[in-house]
Image (tube, grey):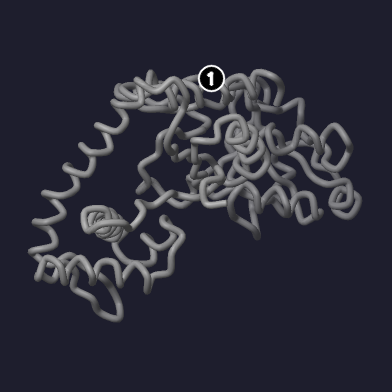
Amino acid sequence: MGDEPRVGCRSEPKRGGNGQAMASELEVFILVAESGGFAGAARRLRLTPSAISRRVALLEDKLGVQLLSRTTRKVELTAAGEAYFARIKPLLAAIASAADDLEQFSPVPVGQLVVGAPAALLERKLVGFVEEYLAAHPQMRIELVPTELGSNVDYDFIVQSLASSDKNKVSMKLTANPWTICAAPDYLARHGTPEHPRDLQAHNCLVIGTHPHWQFFVDDKELNIVPPSRLISFGSAVYRAALDGFGIARLAAFLVNDDLANGRLVKLLDRYSDTRPRDLYLIADADKIALTKHAGFADFIKAKFAAGF
């Protein structure tokens, strides 16, 4: 069972000889330093903080130097730890890059990819797509990471609603993804239906924390509203609250298209909707997109979105 492809699992180096064990401990140390503590590294590696602490302690024993200063409140690099981190991180990056370079000689995708996307998109679409991809590529592993967790993740791909302005990235359009104001019929039956964007001030609105402004067009002029809300959260939580009849939400097409079609949600204020294009993009490193596993995964994901959203 250990060799089966898994969604959301990062494969760690197997602890064989001393060199392999050392490599694993080095990677753990790098993650602790980048995450600012054991808890962040533990989440990334799907281990407990105590297991992470033991790995670093083992590395310190081998080196004979304390790399981390530990208190009950925080974990910090010592002067030795900072110097070691500065030397080791580029070396590990070079090793990973060398492994990537070898992949061009592989006729099939092999290895691991880290893919980031909003949690709601992961749950509604990408998990299913990735399961299908892994079934066809048994030598691949995929780690799916919600982008709401922050930017301190070494992503191979990110799915997001904006093209990247980074010249070292490539942005591949996946699909149109307009946003819709909507609510459950139960909520509207209890609280009435807003007829104008300003009517939202009298309603309970459900707001995605990263998108607090709702855009409309009234008399051909843009109107931006920050609606009143008793719930601010990730898209997946806002979506669930809207389905439960808790309020009015502004949600992306990938979340609500099916619910609008079957009547679980009702589109609101359509005559005032912001009709400017809203798209989803797949973002990748420009210097990696030609590698076998990267190119194959990108082609697969683009085909899945092109087949219908």
In screen coordinates, is 24 left or right of 249?
Answer: left
Residue 203 lies, in percent from the top left, at 74, 52
Nearest to the observer: residue 109 or residue 36? 109
Residue at 13% from the left image edge and 50% from the top image edge: 86
What is the quadrant of residue 49 in the picture? bottom left
What is the quadrant of residue 45 in the picture? bottom left
In screen coordinates, is 44 left or right of 194?
Answer: left
Residue at 40% from the left image edge and 63% from the top image edge: 42
Confirm whether residue 152 shows in the render: yes
Confirm whether residue 212 shows in the render: no
Please state which amino acid type lies under the numbered disc 1: Asp
Label 1 element class: helix
Residue 132 lies, in percent from the top left, at 65, 33
Nearest to the observer: residue 94 or residue 254? 94
Which residue has dot 1 on it?
Answer: 299
Nearest to the observer: residue 163 or residue 4? 4
Residue at 63% from the left image edge and 38% from the top image edge: 131
In screen coordinates, is 34 left or right of 181?
Answer: left
Nearest to the observer: residue 265 or residue 44? 44
